[in-house]
């Protein structure tokens, strides 16, 4: 939104946290018999330097209780595993021989995690001081909580849209990619869906959806709810929060736990082809989520209507995206010509 507020921390301080040197002090790895309170799980693909920054931020700002870090290298070809072995020998490194994508990689790590609390963290994040401890403390003090998500900040200190209502039919108009939201981003319905007022109030609150970029859950809840749905990518977080709610727990947003999210620097949006495939994946996941949670009757006519609407929306957004890409490329060429002259 245009009037997203800044955190109390100056943007310059956030930038220095992002750019700080990677040299950190590692601790002695935990033995297989030592208890683990927190398991940090990070899936990464072709983002060697980004994930190294993420790991360095954890070691600069570690939790106060025993923890482990599990990184799943999802068949990267950029030397990620070699760098992690050389600079972060304490990390438990799992290497996929083929690219399994986000959900399957995280599910694989869940099988190896030993912690009482599971912290799913994107590779393109920077963990700030006390963030992990605050999330653990909240879950301990709120047994009704099935998940807690941190505040996510952009690199300039503005608050990201990391918490919102669960998807419904209104999302087509007022969701993050909704038509009305794109045309009128500050309309009251969109602000309400994204909990604009609550996010800026500074108090924890119950929310439908929490971003998986920084989300912690008790292991017992994961054992009850099960794995992430490997059919989805974009709506896997909404699906998991929905399943947590159906199991009788609540999802909380915790503003006093803060993590910087360098959105789209994690290796999945680096080319036009990947951005187009990402847009297609988003619409496919919308349909999977709809059929799973909103219209479970396979022969409902609404399924065909929703499928047709999603197809039309995909083509419209793809056209807009391609046009924007062409305009951007033309401007870049024009700048190069002016510089050459």
Image: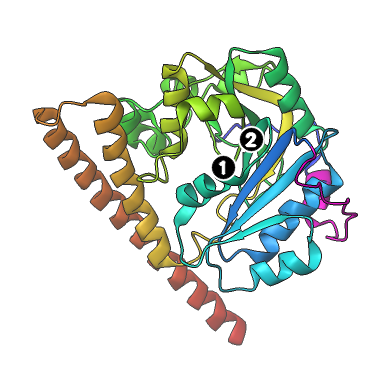
Identify which residue, 47 or 63, lies in the foreground: 63
Give the label, 2 or 1, closer to the camera.
Answer: 1
Identify the magenta region. Answer: 13-34
Q: Is residue 79 visible?
A: yes
The residue depicted at 65 percent of the width and 68 percent of the height is 80
Q: Is residue 279 above or below residue 11?
A: below
The disc, 2 or 1, on the residue closer to the chain's N-terminal end is 1
Residue 296's image quarter?
top left
State the residue at coordinates (82%, 51%): 29
**Hey, which quadrant is residue 325 in on the image?**
bottom left
Instruction: Return the x and y of residue 223 as percentages of the image width and height.
Output: 52, 29
Disc 1 target residue: 110
Do callouts 2 and 1 mark residues in contact (Cβ within 8 Å)? yes
In the foreground, 102 or 149: 102
Q: Secondary structure at mark 2?
A: strand
Residue at position x 79%, y 56% in the image: 90
Judging by the rendered image, the residue that carries numbered circle 2 is 118
**168 w.r.t. 14: above or below:** above
Q: Which quadrant of the rendered structure holds the C terminus?
A: bottom right
Residue at the right extreme, as displayed = 25
Q: Is residue 112 magenta?
A: no
Badge 2 crowding class, 10 Å Cα cut-off, few under 14, some 14 to 19, many 20 or more, is many
Q: Secondary structure at mark 1?
A: helix
Out of 5 and 170, give the one closest to the viewer: 170
Residue 227: x, y in percent?
46, 37
Q: Which residue does the image show at 47% across and 35% down from the upper left?
A: 237
Q: In this rendering, is residue 153 above or below 296? A: below
């Amino acid at each position: 939104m245009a009037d997203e507020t800044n955190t109390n921390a100056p943007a310059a301080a956030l930038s220095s946290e992002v750019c700080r040197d990677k040299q950190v002090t590692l601790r002695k790895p935990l033995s297989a018999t030592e208890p683990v309170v927190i398991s940090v799980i990070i899936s990464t693909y072709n983002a060697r330097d980004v994930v190294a920054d993420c790991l360095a931020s954890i070691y600069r700002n570690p939790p106060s209780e025993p923890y482990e870090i599990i990184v799943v290298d999802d068949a990267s070809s950029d030397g990620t595993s070699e760098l992690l072995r050389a600079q972060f020998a304490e990390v438990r490194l799992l290497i996929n021989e083929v690219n399994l994508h986000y959900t399957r990689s995280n599910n694989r790590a869940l099988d190896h995690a030993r912690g009482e609390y599971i912290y799913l963290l994107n590779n393109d994040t920077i963990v700030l001081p006390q963030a992990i401890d605050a999330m653990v403390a909240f879950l301990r003090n709120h047994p009704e909580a099935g998940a807690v998500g941190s505040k996510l900040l952009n690199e300039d200190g503005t608050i990201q849209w990391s918490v919102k209502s669960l998807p419904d039919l209104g999302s087509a108009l007022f969701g993050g990619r909704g038509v009305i939201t794109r045309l009128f981003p500050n309309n009251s319905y969109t602000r309400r869906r994204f909990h604009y007022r609550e996010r800026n109030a500074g108090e924890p609150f119950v929310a439908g959806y929490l971003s998986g970029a920084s989300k912690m859950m008790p292991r017992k809840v994961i054992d009850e709810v099960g794995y992430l749905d490997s059919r989805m990518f974009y709506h896997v977080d909404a699906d998991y929060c929905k399943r947590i709610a159906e199991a009788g727990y609540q999802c909380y947003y915790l503003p006093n736990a803060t993590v910087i999210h360098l959105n789209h620097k994690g290796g999945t949006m680096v080319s036009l082809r990947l951005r187009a495939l990402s847009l297609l994946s988003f619409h496919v996941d919308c349909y999977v989520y709809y059929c799973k949670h909103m219209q479970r009757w396979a022969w409902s006519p609404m399924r065909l209507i929703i499928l047709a609407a999603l197809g039309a929306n995909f083509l419209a957004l793809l056209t807009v995206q391609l046009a924007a890409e062409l305009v951007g490329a033309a401007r870049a060429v024009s700048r190069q010509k002016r510089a050459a002259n």
